[in-house]
Amino acid sequence: MSPRAACRLERLGFDRVYDYTAGIADWKAAGLPVEGDAAPAQRVGDATRPDVPTCEPHEPIADVQERTARAGWDECIVVDCERVVVGRLRGRAWQTEPGTTAGDVMEAGPTTVRADGLLAPLVERMSRRGTSLVVVSTPQGELLGVVLRAEAERVLTGEPAARIWRDCEGCPGVWAAPPSPSA
Amino acid sequence: MTAAIDRAELRRLTASEDAQIVDVLPEREYAESHIPGAINIPLGSLDASSVSVLRRDKPVVVY
C-alpha cells in the first residue's frame, strides 16, 4: 500500500518522499511507543530491562564477570559489534580458566522474544518452564534488554516498571524510559 | 524515485529534518495505533486536496 502512496505523492509534486516499508509492525517490534486507542494490553517491552550487562565474544571472561557482578547481575548477554545477540553467560560459564573468552563459554544462539508480544503469556510460559530471564531483541536480532520473571510479574499486577527498577537491589539506578520517536 | 528506508533512517529524518510521517492505512487501523506524530491520509483519499496539510519543503515518510 505504501509504495502506491509514495508514487502518488510524487505525482502530486512532493520531491522528497520516503517509504518506511517495514511499517508499524517493525516499529512496534522494536519496542517503540505508539499512539492510538487500542486496548493498552501490557507488552513485553513494558517489562524489558535495558540495563542488562553486555559483552563481546572476544572479551576475557574474568573481566566480564567482574563487570557483571559489579552491576549487580549474575548474567551477561553476549552481543556482536552491532549489538546483535549471539550468546548468554550464566551459571557454570563463570567457573572457567583465566584467559577464557566470553565466546568460548557462552550459550550460543539464545532464544529471544519480541518487545511487542503480550507480556502475560510470556510470564506464564516462563513460570511453567522455571525460566527467570528471557532476552528481548528486535526482529533483526539487536538486543533491547531482558525480562526478569519476578519483575514482570509485578508489572502485570499494575506496578509501574520505573518504580520496580528503581527499588530493585543492585540496579544501576534509573530505568531508561522507552525511546521517543525522535530520539 | 521513492527511497525505501528503515526504522533508523525514519528516526533520523524526523529528528534532524523534521520529516512528516503519513500513515496511509485505513482510518480504523490508524485509530488503533500509529507512530507518534503520524497523520492519517488513507490511500483511498490521498489526493491534491488531502495532501494540502503537508509541507512541501519537508521530507514525507509514508507507511
Image (cartoon, rainbow, N blue to C red):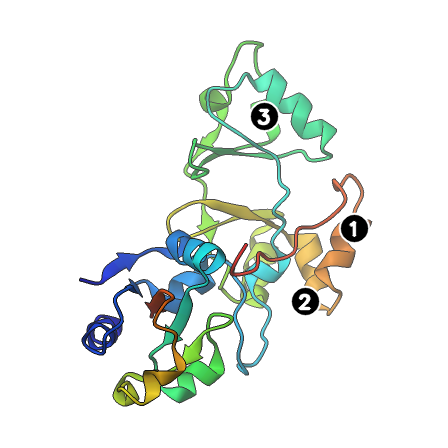
Residue lying farthest front?
B57
* Viewer-side residue, A148 vs A33: A33
Q: What percent of the width, then of the height, locates residue A15?
A: 25, 66
Q: What percent of the width, then of the height, locates residue A74?
A: 67, 33
What is the crowding at mark 1: few (fewer than 14 residues within 10 Å), some, or many (at least 20)?
some
C-alpha separation, residue under disc 3 versus residue under disc 2: 31 Å
A69 vs A12: above or below? above
The residue wearing badge 2 is A156
Labels 3 and 2 within one chain: yes
> Which mark identifies residue A166?
1
> Which chain does the numbered disc 1 sit on?
A
Specify the amino acid type for callout 3. Answer: Arg
Judged from the image, the secondary structure of the residue bearing numbered disc 2 is helix
Specify the amino acid type for callout 2. Answer: Leu
> Which chain does the numbered disc 2 sit on?
A
What is the crowding at mark 3: few (fewer than 14 residues within 10 Å), some, or many (at least 20)?
few
The residue wearing badge 3 is A92
Labels 1 and 2 within one chain: yes
Specify the amino acid type for callout 1. Answer: Arg
Q: Residue at x 62, y 40 (%)?
A: A52
Image marks 3 and 2: residues in contact by CB distance under 8 Å = no
